[in-house]
């Protein structure tokens, strides 16, 4: 019966491998807790894929911040302003669906442009009214790790506002997955109100100390950017995609798909400036297809995968080149869509 259902499916081999893995677990595990874990993970993934499918053609910004932030706190209003400007720039806004900063962001985005990724907690995590009434825009996750998976899988940018353990956990998870190349390059902005040194102190005490001890590379500081107002945050995100469109990583190289071609006359200078980024070979211009089958100009390079911070510096340099800007900021998130999806 299963064989008939997946007959002709383009991913049949992967489906068969997944089934074999489940059968292998079934041979060894008999206890209820293990099967609750497996069932819950699969249900989280299945439900999230179904809910996100209609929203794949829309760019999304994830906003993280404290659930304890009060409405009179400047961070709440800043979250509202950020989300409102993000929607005007063409983004939907994703939050953890709770109160505080999350509520402020969903309030600013409005029901039609908010997505909430809720998780079962004994406190603090009741869905806010700006996502709880939005049909198909509130997801319930059983586990934090499946929720985190979809936050990054569906995000074209991340904005982190002041928060506690949960917020810092989300920030460090994003940084870990970006630094290790497990997620494609996306802008990550640390946002706090004007005059609030929350992130300046954090970067000094954590990031700078790690770099001083040699625990991270000095350029890893460029994996994040700071902003002190909503306008600055959205401008930083939009600039990240000015020339850069998306990245496709293979076994031994990365291909940066671009909105504008880089003239070949500039390649010697790029190779000279960023020779330390390369594992071997040289930066080469070409063309590559995105996941919608659209042919785009590209740059190909074999880069040292331990130098993701340097890769971000390279992308920033490309975005600063005097090249024609794309007429509209296209959706990098379409890298997960099918070839028949609208561009």
Image: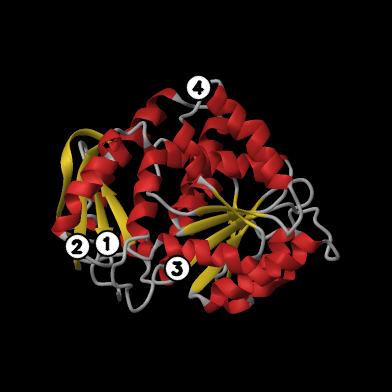
Asked whether the viewer can see residue 129, the reply is: yes
Dot in front, 3 or 4: 4
User: In the rendered structure, which disc, 1 or 3, sits on the residue that comes first in sequence?
Assistant: 3
Residue 86, given in percent of the width and then of the height, sits at 56, 71
Per the model, the C-alpha gap separating discs 1 and 3 is: 17 Å
Q: Residue at x 37, y 60 (%)?
A: 320
Per the model, the C-alpha gap separating discs 4 and 1 is: 33 Å
* Numbered disc 4: secondary structure: loop
User: In the rendered structure, which disc, 4 or 2, sits on the residue that comes first in sequence?
Assistant: 4
* Numbered disc 3: secondary structure: strand
User: In the rendered structure, which disc, 2 or 3, sits on the residue that comes first in sequence?
Assistant: 3
User: How many numbered markers are drawn?
Assistant: 4
Of the pair 13 and 305, the residue shown nearer to us: 305
Per the model, the C-alpha gap separating discs 2 and 3 is: 21 Å
User: In the rendered structure, which disc, 4 or 1, sits on the residue that comes first in sequence?
Assistant: 4
Dot in front, 4 or 2: 4
Residue bearing mark 3:
59
Residue bearing mark 1:
258
Tag 4 near tag 2, CB within 8 Å: no
Q: Is residue 41 left or right of residue 330?
A: right
Per the model, the C-alpha gap separating discs 3 and 4 is: 36 Å
Dot in front, 2 or 3: 2
Q: Residue at x 43, y 59 (%)?
A: 49
Tag 1 near tag 2, CB within 8 Å: yes
Q: Residue at x 40, y 67 (%)?
A: 56
* Numbered disc 1: secondary structure: strand
Q: Which mark is residue 297?
A: 2
Q: Quadrant of residue 73?
A: bottom right
* Numbered disc 2: secondary structure: strand
Query: How many residues crowd around disc 3 within 10 Å: few (fewer than 14), some, or many (20 or more)?
Result: many
Of the pair 22 and 146, the residue shown nearer to us: 146
């Amino acid at each position: 019966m299963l064989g008939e259902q997946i007959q002709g499916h383009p991913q049949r081999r992967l489906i068969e491998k997944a089934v074999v893995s489940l059968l292998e677990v079934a041979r060894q595990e008999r206890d209820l807790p293990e099967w609750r874990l497996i069932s819950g993970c699969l249900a989280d993934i299945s439900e999230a894929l179904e809910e996100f499918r209609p929203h794949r053609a829309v760019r999304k910004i994830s906003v993280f911040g404290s659930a304890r932030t009060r409405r009179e706190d400047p961070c709440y209003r800043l979250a509202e302003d950020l989300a409102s400007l993000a929607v005007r720039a063409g983004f939907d806004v994703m939050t953890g669906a709770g109160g505080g900063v999350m509520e402020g962001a969903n309030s600013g985005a409005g029901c039609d442009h908010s997505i909430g990724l809720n998780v079962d907690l004994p406190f603090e995590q009741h869905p806010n009214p700006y996502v709880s009434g939005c049909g198909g825009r509130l997801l319930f996750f059983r586990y934090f790790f499946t929720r985190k998976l979809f936050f990054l899988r569906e995000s074209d940018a991340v904005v982190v506002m002041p928060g506690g353990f949960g917020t810092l956990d989300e920030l460090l998870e994003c940084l870990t997955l970006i630094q290790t190349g497990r997620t494609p390059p996306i802008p990550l902005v640390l946002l706090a109100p004007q005059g609030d040194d929350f992130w300046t102190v954090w970067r000094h005490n954590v990031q700078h100390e790690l770099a001083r001890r040699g625990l991270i590379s000095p350029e890893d500081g460029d994996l994040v950017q700071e902003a002190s107002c909503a306008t600055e945050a959205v401008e930083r995100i939009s600039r990240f995609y000015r020339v850069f469109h998306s990245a496709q990583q293979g076994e031994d190289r990365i291909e940066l798909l671009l909105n504008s071609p880089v003239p070949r006359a500039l390649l010697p200078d790029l190779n000279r400036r960023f020779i330390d980024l390369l594992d071997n070979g040289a930066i080469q211009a070409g063309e590559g297809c995105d996941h919608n089958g659209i042919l785009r100009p590209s740059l190909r390079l074999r880069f040292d995968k331990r130098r993701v911070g340097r890769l971000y510096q390279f992308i920033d340099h490309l975005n600063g080149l005097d090249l024609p800007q794309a007429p509209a900021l296209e959706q990098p998130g379409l890298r997960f869509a099918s070839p028949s999806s609208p561009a």
